[in-house]
Amino acid sequence: MKTIILNEPGSVDNLLYAESAKPSINTNEVLVKTISLSVNVIDYKVRSNEGALNWILGADRPAVIGWDLSGTVVEVGNDVSDFKIGDEVFGMANFPGKGNAYAEFVAVPSAHLTLKPKAVSHQEAASATLAALTAWQALAEKGNIKKGDKVLIHAASGGVGHYATQIAKHFGAYVIGTSSAKNKDFILQNGADQHIDYTAENFQQIVSDADFVLDTLGGDTILKSLDVVKQGGTIISIASSSFSAQELEKAKAKEVNLSFLLVASSGKNMLQLAELLEKGIIKSHVSKIFAFEQMREAHLYLEKGRTVGKIVVNL
């Protein structure tokens, strides 16, 4: 089968195309023939950084990165009752861990997948995996967003951001999204009530008493966001896994729940997202599609940091 392997971290030239044996499955797994997969920021961070590569995948080499996929079940483990051969499924495989999704066939725990809605394309489904799961787990599970909450989403036009905007609106929140001016219409079309152009405006002077802030950027975003979140509010970062003494002190003074979220594979959450996709409550915005043989170009495109929505790779 076609596979992309990584012998050591580095540039996109380290993504090597290889023919590999089709994986065997455990009793709790299904074998999925990949039709589409999506590429995330974590993909190029793991590809380029040894610390990130070892943290997520461990020290075994060669490594196969990638976690998001949509495709067809071609083999079913003995202990699997939820799926059968021929089912179209999608999900995030083994994150954090060895997803091995940059491949023509992927062995995936059945507990990490759900059925793909018929009206949703494989490209749209593959997109609504790691990014959509991150948004769902941050807002619905950890943030407990509810009707009437004021929600600030940084980089609301990005992969996680565009799902977070739609999910927050689904729960009845008042949503404020930041981006550059060129993506204003996109963010408002996703349901945001208010847009802030970070290149020309200071969100600290515009936003106040936010119930919830989603930090997708890192850097000084958390410290600035602590100025606009209300007493007892919540800030969840998917970009910073540790916080400075200044951030922690400021959060404590305002009784703000400040935490880091690392998304985890979940078939239960995938089913919840599938239902939202099927009803049209959330939609995947696929901005660009690459062929499997263009994975290096896909990484370079994503690394520019200007992707609206998601990019997809087709096999």
Image: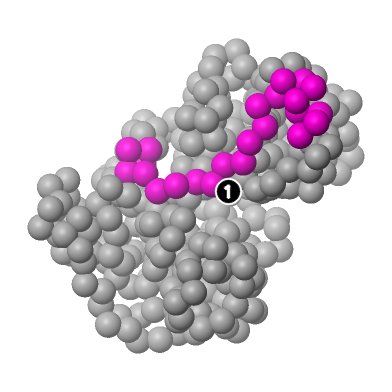
| Image quadrant occupied by the C terminus | bottom left
Q: Amino acid at mark 1?
A: Gly
Instruction: Indicate the quadrant where residue 149 lies.
Output: top right
Give the residues in magenta: 248-270
Instruction: Indicate the quadrant where residue 272 lies.
Output: top left
Q: Residue at x 40, y 63 (%)?
A: 99
Q: Residue at x 20, y 55 (%)?
A: 28
Q: Is residue 191 above or below residue 38?
A: above
Q: Residue at x 59, y 19 (%)?
A: 173
Does 264 appear in magenta? yes
Q: Is residue 251 above or below residue 240?
A: above
Q: Nearer the viewer, residue 279 or 163?
A: 163
* Residue 148 in sight in this render: yes
| Image quadrant occupied by the N terminus | bottom left
Instruction: Indicate the quadrant where residue 307 lies.
Output: bottom right
Q: Is residue 293 left or right of residue 118?
A: right
Q: Is residue 293 left or right of residue 35?
A: right
The x, y position of residue 106, in whole percent, is: 31, 67
Query: Mark 1 falls on what kind of element?
Result: helix
- Residue beneath disc 1: 159
* Residue 293 in sight in this render: no
The x, y position of residue 5, in whole percent, is: 46, 80
